[in-house]
Image: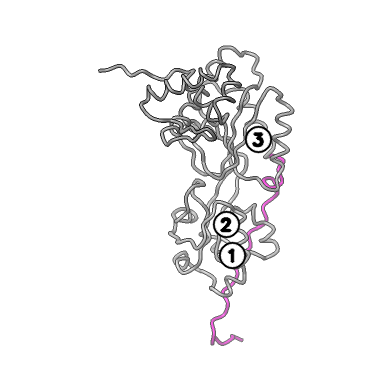
Amino acid sequence: MQAVELPETSELLTFASTVEAGSIARAAQELGVPRPTISRRLARLEEKLGVRLLRRTTRSMVLTDAGEILLARARAVLAALRDADASVRRRDDVPRGLLRVSVPPFQGTRFPAMLADFLGRHPEVRLEVDTTTRHVDLAGGGFDVAIRATAELPPGLVARTLARSRLLGVASPAYLAQAGVPRRVSELSRHRCLAGFERGDRAVTYWPLLPRGRVRIDPLLASNDLQVLAEAARSGRGIALLPEPWIRDALASLELVPVLPARLGAETRVSVVFSDREFVPASVRAFVDAAVAWARVEPAFVDSPAPVPAQPPAPPRRGARARG
């Protein structure tokens, strides 16, 4: 069997740094090496792999498909090497270095203040925060920590629960007056449904049921933005399945009312997750602790959930006589 010449760490570091810097000149400056050295390392890496990684012009630099794949793996390899180096060199347990975090949108919360406080407490940490509804691959994407709403945890991850909530089917009174109040799960097939994205990257085609099971839906509107779905529901465009904390005010004001509350929905939780490994960097542990402390006092999480009102009664059928 012919031996395969593997990429060197310096080549992977040069490649990742060049992509992140956006140019060979800036990468050379950040790495402290001459520009020709950067070019030679990139050329050698492409020769070893037998593929083009970057398409370079005088004004731009674009990753190829192969480059996109390698970049994710290179970041994971470099992160693992940094962890290994830190486990040997650092014994003082001080949070330091680059910490990459993936979080969902937290509009109207104290999360930004928590981040600012975290940086103030840990001045040797550099923080990169990517806001997305997608469930990123921590290892493949080069992330250290993620906050996500999910009831399932992929293998190799550890989770600490920040909050528990419920997904609740809701619609506006105007929509239900026009389309009718569904009394059975099977009746959802004739209703307009407003759906979220599964794992943040593809439209949901099934809604969960209590205590178990699911029902197929054909969404009129699908979005990974909860505000879009809540506004569409308030505007009478259909039935949405939303986290109860997002719609407490709308429920209290009767802008929205529950739909099939005993059957439609699921219990869910918001968690901070990180890789299950023998050495967890001090920066990761510090961030997880900060997120847990923030969740304990965050009004969106700690406010007592409003009692879920009963489903509104069905309007009387036309022609039905009132009973005395």
Q: Which amino acid type is shown beneath numbered disc 1?
A: Ala
Residue in the image at 58% along x and 55% along y: 242
Q: Residues within 10 Å of mark 3 (few under 14, many from 20)?
A: many
Q: Is residue 229 above or below residue 108?
A: below
- Circle 2: element type: strand
Indicate left or right for 110 with 213 as reference.
right
Q: Earlier in the sequence, mark 1 or mark 3?
A: 1
> Residue 168 shows which numbered tag?
2
Which dot marks residue 171? 1
Helix, strand or loop at label 1? It is: strand
Q: Main secondary structure of the magenta part?
A: loop
Q: Earlier in the sequence, mark 2 or mark 3?
A: 2
Q: CA distance from mark 2 to mark 1?
A: 10 Å
State the extent of the magenta-drawn residues as a range: 296-324
Q: Nearer the viewer, mark 2 or mark 3?
A: 3
Residue at the front extreme of this rendering? 58
In this rendering, the answer to whether 298 lies above or below 173 is above
**Helix, strand or loop under label 3:** helix
In the displayed structure, 319 sits above or below 107; it is below
Q: Is residue 322 magenta?
A: yes
Q: Residues within 10 Å of mark 1 (few under 14, many from 20)?
A: many
Q: Residue at x 40, y 30 (%)?
A: 52
Q: The disc labelled 3 sits on which kind of residue?
A: Ala
Cα–Cα span, label 1 and label 3: 33 Å
Residue 221 screen position, x and y as percent: 52, 60
Per the image, the residue denoted by label 3 is 291
Quadrant for the N terminus in the image: top left
Q: Position of residue 286 (x, y in %)?
A: 65, 27
- Picture quadrant where residue 230 is located: bottom right
Q: CA distance from mark 2 to mark 3?
A: 25 Å
